[in-house]
Image (spheres, helix red, strand yellow):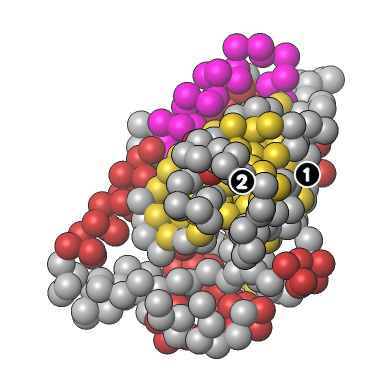
């Protein structure tokens, strides 16, 4: 597969070219922690690799190649036996280090029967994986945010598979000018058409927009019980890494009554892990420091946010499918406008990161 700097800065959708525009020597999310259930092996495609995830008896997560070296059956079809995994096809058993420890038909363990394993970090709601050189896994650590662990916050999470390159979603959340066109009936946000202020510091792209005397977006206003009352609002987002984007809104009520709450804080993590150059896993984790006293809000918020994000999925997958089906689709390149500044900066930083951690032309 191609991994050229020029390809990374070109339009994302390159018909006929499988471009691995993602670094391997990097921490990526493999799953929400609650997706990996005790006794239930989980197979997942991550960065073009078929990976098996399961929990040992003590609850620790194991990640290894999802392929029995005997006849290539996916180990995710097998059974967890204590700390080990058994292949469903012929019963070969492997320990958490990927070593074959049992062959039902013979005492001798075949040489070269060890399966590759991957470093894992489980932190709060997220399970992270390192698919590059395991000796380099200690060079960095996953990004965390304190609100992820704050029990006083409202937390809602969801996952959506994406049949498109992961960077298409990264750029989608870096440019919110699409809100009024993609989400007119869900988010109901209009007028966010002024290009934001964009800065790049220490490998992090940040955008920020300020809106004075505006109502909170529909979902947030309903949670806060503010209706159309005006707030001074700061909407911002940061591309923290290829794997993680944090966005937030910080609102201050313009005309609070005596003793009334004035400040409202909302955060969301957009978590992207490539499955392949043309597909990705998308997890989202939303948090707010208000709405906790509304027990019905969690289910409503999950349904509302999922409905809106499925609208993004529809558009992004349609673009990818059109590019794949028509070799002429993106031959003429693409134009960019002022609102694309943050996305273009993210592409440049991604290209530099891949060359730095994986080296040019690798994988």
Residue for point 50% across, 40% down = 90
Q: Is residue 302 magenta?
A: yes
Residue for point 78% across, 61% down = 141
Residue for point 72% across, 14% down = 293
| Farthest-out residue, top | 295
Name the quadrant of the N terminus: bottom left
Q: Is residue 56 magenta?
A: no
Q: Earlier in the sequence, mark 1 or mark 2?
A: 2
Cβ atoms under marks 1 and 2 closer than 8 Å = no
Q: Which residue is mark 1?
A: 123
Q: Is residue 337 above or below residue 177?
A: below
Q: Which residue is mark 2?
A: 106
What stretch of residues is rendered in magenta? 282-309
Q: Nearer the viewer, residue 173 or 83?
A: 83
Q: Judging from the image, what secondary structure is the residue with disc 1 in?
A: strand
Measured as percent of width and height from the top left, residue 38 is found at: 68, 28
Q: Taking 328 as reference, is 192 left or right?
A: right
Q: Distance of mark 1 from mark 2, alpha carbons? A: 40 Å
Residue for point 74% across, 53% down = 97
Q: Nearer the viewer, residue 111 or 98?
A: 111
Measured as percent of width and height from the top left, residue 122 is found at: 76, 45
């Amino acid at each position: 597969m191609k991994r050229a700097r020029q390809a990374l800065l070109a339009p994302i959708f390159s018909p006929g070219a499988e471009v691995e525009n993602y670094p391997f020597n990097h921490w990526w999310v493999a799953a929400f922690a609650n997706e990996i259930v005790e006794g239930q092996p989980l197979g997942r495609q991550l960065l073009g690799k078929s990976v098996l995830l399961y929990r040992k008896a003590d609850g620790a997560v194991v990640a290894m190649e999802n392929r029995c070296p005997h006849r290539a059956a996916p180990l995710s079809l097998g059974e967890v036996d204590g700390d080990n995994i058994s292949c469903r096809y012929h019963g070969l058993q492997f320990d958490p280090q990927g070593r074959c420890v049992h062959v039902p038909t013979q005492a001798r363990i075949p040489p070269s029967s060890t399966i590759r394993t991957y470093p894992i970090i489980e932190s709060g709601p997220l399970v992270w994986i390192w698919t590059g050189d395991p000796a380099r896994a200690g060079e960095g650590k996953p990004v965390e945010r304190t609100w992820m662990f704050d029990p006083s916050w409202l937390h809602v999470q969801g996952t959506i598979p994406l049949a498109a390159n992961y960077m298409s979603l990264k750029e989608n959340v870096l440019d919110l000018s699409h809100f009024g066109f993609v989400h007119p009936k869900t988010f109901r946000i209009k007028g966010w058409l002024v290009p934001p202020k964009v800065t790049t510091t220490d490998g992090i792209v940040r955008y920020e927009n300020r809106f004075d005397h505006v109502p909170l977006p529909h979902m947030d206003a309903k949670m806060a019980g503010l209706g159309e009352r005006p707030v001074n609002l700061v909407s911002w987002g940061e591309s923290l890494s290829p794997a993680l984007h944090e966005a937030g809104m910080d609102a201050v009520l313009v005309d609070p009554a005596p003793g009334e709450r004035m400040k409202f804080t909302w955060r969301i993590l957009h978590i992207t892990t490539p499955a392949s150059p043309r597909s990705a896993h998308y997890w989202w984790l939303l948090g707010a420091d208000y709405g906790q006293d509304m027990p019905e809000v969690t289910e409503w918020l999950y349904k509302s946010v999922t409905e809106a994000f499925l609208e993004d999925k529809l558009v992004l997958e349609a673009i990818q499918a059109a590019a794949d089906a028509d070799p002429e689709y993106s031959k003429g390149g693409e134009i960019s406008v002022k609102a694309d500044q943050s996305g273009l900066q993210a592409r440049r930083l991604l290209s530099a990161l891949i060359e730095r951690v994986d080296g040019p032309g690798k994988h």
